[in-house]
Amino acid sequence: SYVLAQPPSESVAPGQTARITCGGKNIGSKSGHWYQQKPGQAPVLVVYDDSDRPSGIPERFSGSNSGNTATLTISRVEAGDEADYYCQVWDSSSDLVVFGGGTKLTVL
Amino acid sequence: QVQLQESGPGLVKPSQTLSLTCTVSGGSISSGGYYWSWIRQHPGKGLEWIGFIYYSGSTYYNPSLKSRVTISVDTSKNQFSLKLSSVTAADTAVFYCARVKPPAMDFDYWGQGTLVTVSS
């Protein structure tokens, strides 16, 4: 079955840029989505279709997807961005939703 | 603004069937155009997709749970439901319902989640 690999953790200083990767075989041929989940809360969609932002999501959140890696980029990181981030794709070959294992972003 | 709310018992005994309902407001399931999904999250762990349903009743399930899962829809009540049979302590998790937007199947609206504990 299709597997998405994320680093368990990343850390970044306030004001810097965070990049969270999501690796999968030829993931660039699929549409990648990203979710932010803060403790005790439901996930929130922050990027869909590789690089689109839902209404209300700051422009600081952006995404890209090519080859075997999708990337979520958070510019000018703020303390409030500290959360778990999950990538997700739809594997149409097996009709399966796949989530990455999640990355805990720590703002130093 | 679409809102989803999970409801159901917070405690289920081992070997019994876990039953949850998701009530949708701010949008009609029967309008079509979206799938309606269940996702679970074990304590301290990542997200696990359980399955989803279309208003017509068409379903997709995670193969790892397919033998124990049934998702159904009641368009008259604007609700969809989850049944997970033969539960064990390993099924203890927070269960979320969510709306799914085709064709890329992103989850654009989520319920707040409900914790279900399996214990005697």
Image (cartoon, coloured by chain):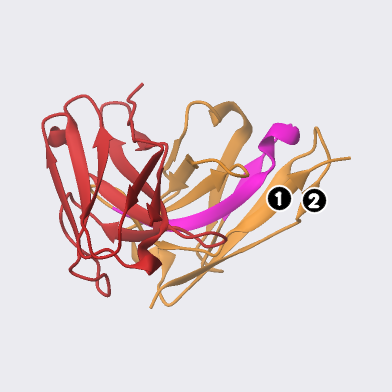
* First along the sequence among labels 2 and 1: 2
For the point 26% across and 51% down, the residue is B102
Chain A appears in which tint?
red
Q: Secondary structure at mark 2?
A: strand
Q: Is residue B87 visible?
A: no
Distance from the alpha carbon under mark 2 to that under mark 1: 6 Å
Q: Which chain is orange?
A: B
Q: Residue furthest right?
A: B120
Observer-nearest of A20 and A50:
A20
Q: Is residue A44 magenta?
A: no
Q: Chain of mark 2?
A: B
Vertical relation: B3 (above or below) A29: below
Residue B116: mark:
1
**Magenta stretch, main secondary structure class:** strand
* Residue interval drawn in magenta: B81-101
Q: Chain of mark 1?
A: B
Vertical relation: A44 (above or below) A20: below
Q: Amino acid at mark 1?
A: Val
For the point 38% across and 67% down, the residue is A79
Q: Is residue B107 visible?
A: yes
